[in-house]
Amino acid sequence: VSLSTMFRILGVSWGCVFLFLLAVSLSTASNSTCELPTIDFEEGMKRHYVVGVLAIRGPEAAFNEWNKTFNAYLTQTAGKRFTERISFSMVALNFITLFTSVETKEVDFIFVNPSAYSCMESQYGANSLASLRNIRRVGSNEYTTTEFGGVVFTRKDRKDLNKLSDLKDRSFAAASISGLGSGQAQFRLL
């Protein structure tokens, strides 16, 4: 699926994509004395864009972690680069509202984990514009996560299920097919 197809599905213009990429590049050029050009506001271009953030740890945590980036920062940096100022806001989504918000075009961009993105790519033809390195702090140490997984468990009374091969030709449940650790990783192994 081409980028143009994804933009048509999401109702996003190439100008908006350029705007997003410009905002990302501004974060690395913020100390630069180079003056960036103003971008002409395109006919039919929206004045406000909504970034949907997958709120795995809840809406409040997502808002606290990402609102400054997707609301204040994008509006203050990229938004003022247009001849007619544009703005951004963030909305916290869960796995259910993520799909409905994309389908109903309530969001213009999505910021999601790889498993949710794979579902958006498969179902709606989404394409990735940027990727994020995940760094975790434990005490004074920082770790870049390179692996992710999930758990398969059984009831205590199921003595016949001890390894993954014991699940062959059996029915079992997962929390979500759109969650990497709650379905996708397990289904891939099986």
Image (tube, rainbow, N blue to C red):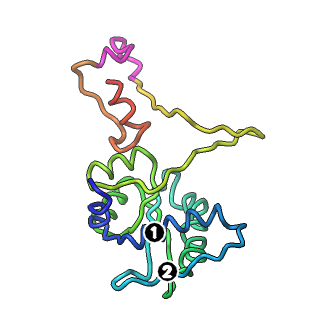
Q: Position of residue 59 (x, y in %)?
A: 51, 60
- Under mark 1, the amino acid is Phe
C-alpha separation, residue under disc 1 versus residue under disc 2? 10 Å
Report the residue at 32% width, 15% height from top.
165
User: On residue 138, which mark appears?
Assistant: none
Query: In the rendered image of this protein, does residue 165 appear above or below residue 141?
Result: above
Residue ID for mark 1: 18
Is 92 left or right of 159, judged from the image as shown?
A: right
User: Considering only order in the chain, which callout, 2 or 1, is on the residue closer to the N terminus?
Assistant: 1
Report the residue at 31% width, 33% height from top.
173
Dominant secondary-structure state across the stretch colored magenta: loop
Is 57 left or right of 98, judged from the image as shown?
A: right
Q: How many marks?
A: 2
Query: Dot 2, crowdedness within 10 Å: few (<14), some or many (≥20)?
Result: some
**Depth check, front residue: 28 or 96:** 28
**Depth check, front residue: 147 or 14:** 14
The magenta segment is 154-167
Report the residue at 57% width, 66% height from top.
67
- Under mark 2, the amino acid is Ile
User: On residue 39, which mark appears?
Assistant: 2
**Depth check, front residue: 52 or 27:** 27
Q: Are marks 1 and 2 in contact (CB under 8 Å)?
A: yes
Q: Quadrant of residue 163?
A: top left
Q: Please tell me whether residue 32 belongs to the stretch shown in magenta.
A: no
